[in-house]
Image (spheres, helix red, strand yellow):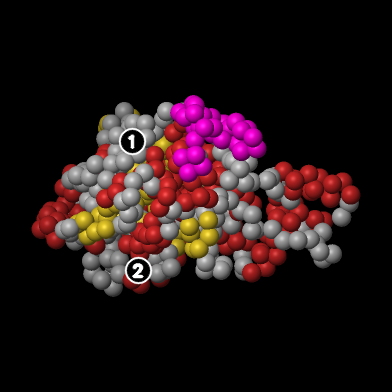
């Protein structure tokens, strides 16, 4: 390795290996004054001008109120993961950066609002909880907190850490003789209290969205938010709303949302994006693997930067040391794919999110799937978006249909030729009112032998309507597109118990009276999705998207397909920031197109 690189490496090492001594206040956060070799916070000397004349124990009592890092070293004992022994809590480099963000807001007279994206194994969650404990135990009395974990066992681990802290707290630094201890609040299994500080701590999980209601809170630690439970009955938004609604937007309050990444399919990712874009009250903090001291390896004769690939060379360009890159190079050998290492040890926030879920398509494939996005030709009053107008038919016996986009087109007065219809209309039924679960109608030109083109999206609609009105809208537009073959999933019609009567009525009175409804020969019913059909639907969607076998002009639908993820149970889902029904609509369309192709080949 050349001398220039080695010299530069020594400079980088000296920069990141700065001296840190919380007892002397060296390398600590915030504005400090050198008082005879001890670097004290400016706020301490402003609040206590007589500090130099105090006794040693009085100095300690005053200093811990203003110097969090000194308090951690002096008062907090944690269990060392390697030795299992109790040791003073000395902040590492990433913890100091997170503390700087929190204290920067607090000392500026602002409420502390942080969203933290974590790499693994550096103690981010520990720091947040110890910081809140400092505010409760030292800075002020009567301030209540809540800890919300992914599951109850994660909250229990935090409680155990608090018990250890309190059990080993130096008695001489307490303001009175009262003992610090966590005790259960009668009839409140989720709440513990510290009577000596007149404060309580609520420990709950994402499965209990109402736990914070009615509590007088000042601090909230929301842990592993990306993994919070989310289903039809529990929404992370509800719990966040409950917690934040219980904490005033005032000086001295703290809300920290923290998590490791869990793909872009989460509430946490959406909140992170809002924070990065400056649209949130929360300040984003990301800790990369390279900031963690343990992730480096001493150089030996086997390592040379020239032998690294382009990604590892880019780490040098980003300012990492050779020891860090060597560690990454060796660690990478433990993973079958590079993206798995990126998920565990991300270099950037985007890398963390993009590699922590199993996307069906690679980044290059995702870009290709969105190649056909195009601006629509028109957006109609009923919300339908049109890319290609219905093709007129010049056969004998034609009749005029007026009013479509203000133009007149000749339409055939001829019997529909079954599965050889030119257009396909696919209806995916969603909620009548929930904007997160809209219905989707897509119309596809699937039979264009003149141009010999791939199936292409002609028009689409997304929104929330009662089932009977949705049915009328579907029939109206399928009729406009040459009596398109209409596909509707029977599961959707029978989705909820309270909708079954209406679903049966709409099927009989609207859809079955339409002249060209898709009926599955094997089921003698409209499209019915069982496990086998589900697998075939997504097989066709993945195959067609990967090989460019259809043309989708709709930006959101193409993006939803491109960002499709596969879960460990084998099911496919849209990114949570997208629309699951859009994904199902495309899968249903491609499945039926394949069925049409197979049937026509037998005619």
Q: Which quadrant is home to the C terminus?
A: bottom left
> Which residue is depicted at the point 66% across and 64% down?
332
Left or right: 276 with respect to 480?
right
Which-is-in-front pick, marks 1 and 2? 2
Q: Is residue 502 above or below residue 58?
A: below
* Residue 531: x %, y % from top left: 33, 71
Compare residues 224 and 564 and report the one nearer the observer: 224
Q: Dot 1, crowdedness within 10 Å: few (<14), some or many (≥20)?
A: some
The residue depicted at 74 percent of the width and 56 percent of the height is: 323
The residue that mark 2 highlights is 533
Q: Nearer the viewer, residue 564 or 350?
A: 350
Q: Quadrant of residue 481?
A: top left
SS at badge 2: helix
> Where residue 477 sits in the image (x, y, percent)?
28, 43
Residue 146 in sight: no
Considering the image in quadrants, where does the N terminus appear? bottom right
Image spot of residue 41 (x, y percent):
54, 34
Disc 2 residue crowd, few under 14, some 14–19, many 20+, Cα 10 Å: some
Cα gap from disc 1 to disc 2, whole angstroms:
38 Å
Residue 558 rendering spot, x and y as whole percentages: 46, 48
Q: Which image quarter: residue 215? A: top left
Q: Is residue 82 above or below residue 70?
A: below
The reply to whether the magenta stretch includes residue 50 is yes
Disc ID at residue 409: 1
154 vs 454, left or right, is left
- Magenta residues (range): 31-59
């Amino acid at each position: 390795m050349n001398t220039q690189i080695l010299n530069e490496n020594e400079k980088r090492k000296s920069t990141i290996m700065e001296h840190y001594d919380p007892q002397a206040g060296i390398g600590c956060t915030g504005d400090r004054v050198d008082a005879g070799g001890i670097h004290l916070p400016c706020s301490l000397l402003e609040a206590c001008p007589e500090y130099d004349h105090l006794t040693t124990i009085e100095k300690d009592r005053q200093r811990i109120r203003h110097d969090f890092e000194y308090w951690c070293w002096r008062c907090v004992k944690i269990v060392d993961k390697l030795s299992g022994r109790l040791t003073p809590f000395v902040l590492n480099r990433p913890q100091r950066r997170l503390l700087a963000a929190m204290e920067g807001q607090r000392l500026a007279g602002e409420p502390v609002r942080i969203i933290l994206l974590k790499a693994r194994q550096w103690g981010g969650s520990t720091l947040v909880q110890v910081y809140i404990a400092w505010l409760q135990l030292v800075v002020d009395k009567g301030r209540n907190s809540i800890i919300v974990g992914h599951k109850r066992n994660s909250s229990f681990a935090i409680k155990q850490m608090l018990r250890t802290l309190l059990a080993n707290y130096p008695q001489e630094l307490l303001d009175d003789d009262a003992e610090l201890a966590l005790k259960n609040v009668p009839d409140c299994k989720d709440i513990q209290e510290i009577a000596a500080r007149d404060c309580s701590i609520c420990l709950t999980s994402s499965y209990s969205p109402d736990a914070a209601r009615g509590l007088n809170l000042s601090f909230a630690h929301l842990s592993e938010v990306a993994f919070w439970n989310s289903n039809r009955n529990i929404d992370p938004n509800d719990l966040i709303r409950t917690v934040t609604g219980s904490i005033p937007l005032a000086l001295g309050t703290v809300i920290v949302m923290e998590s490791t990444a869990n793909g872009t399919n989460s509430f946490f990712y959406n909140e992170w994006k809002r924070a990065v874009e400056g649209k949130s009250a929360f300040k984003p903090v990301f800790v990369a693997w390279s900031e963690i001291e343990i992730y480096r390896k001493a150089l030996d004769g086997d390592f040379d930067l020239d032998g690294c690939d382009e990604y590892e060379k880019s780490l040098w360009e980003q300012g990492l040391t050779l020891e860090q890159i060597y560690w990454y190079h060796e660690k990478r050998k433990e993973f079958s794919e590079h993206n798995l290492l990126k998920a565990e040890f991300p270099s950037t926030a985007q890398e963390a999110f993009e590699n922590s879920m199993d996307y069906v398509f690679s980044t290059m494939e995702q870009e290709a799937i969105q190649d056909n996005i195009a601006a629509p030709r028109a957006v109609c009053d009923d919300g339908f978006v049109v890319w290609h107008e219905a093709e007129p038919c010049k056969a004998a016996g034609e009749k005029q249909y007026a009013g479509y986009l203000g133009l007149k087109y000749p339409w055939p007065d001829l019997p529909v030729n079954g599965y050889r219809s030119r257009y396909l209309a696919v209806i995916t039924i969603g909620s009548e009112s929930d904007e997160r679960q809209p219905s989707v109608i897509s119309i596809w030109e699937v039979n264009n032998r003149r141009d010999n083109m791939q199936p292409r999206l002609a028009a689409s609609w997304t929104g929330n309507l009662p089932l009977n009105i949705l049915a009328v809208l579907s029939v109206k537009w399928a009729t406009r597109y040459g009596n398109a073959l209409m596909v509707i999933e029977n599961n959707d019609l029978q989705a909820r118990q309270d909708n079954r009567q209406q679903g049966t009525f709409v099927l009989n009175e609207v859809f079955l009276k339409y002249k060209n409804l898709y009926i599955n020969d094997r089921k003698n019913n409209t499209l019915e999705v069982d496990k086998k059909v589900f697998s075939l639907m997504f097989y066709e969607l993945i195959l067609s998207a990967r090989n460019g076998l259809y043309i989708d002009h709709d930006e959101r639908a193409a993006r939803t397909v491109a960002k499709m993820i596969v879960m460990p149970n084998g099911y496919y889902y849209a990114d949570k920031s997208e629309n699951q029904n859009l994904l199902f609509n495309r899968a249903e369309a491609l499945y039926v197109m394949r069925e049409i192709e197979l049937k026509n080949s037998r005619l």
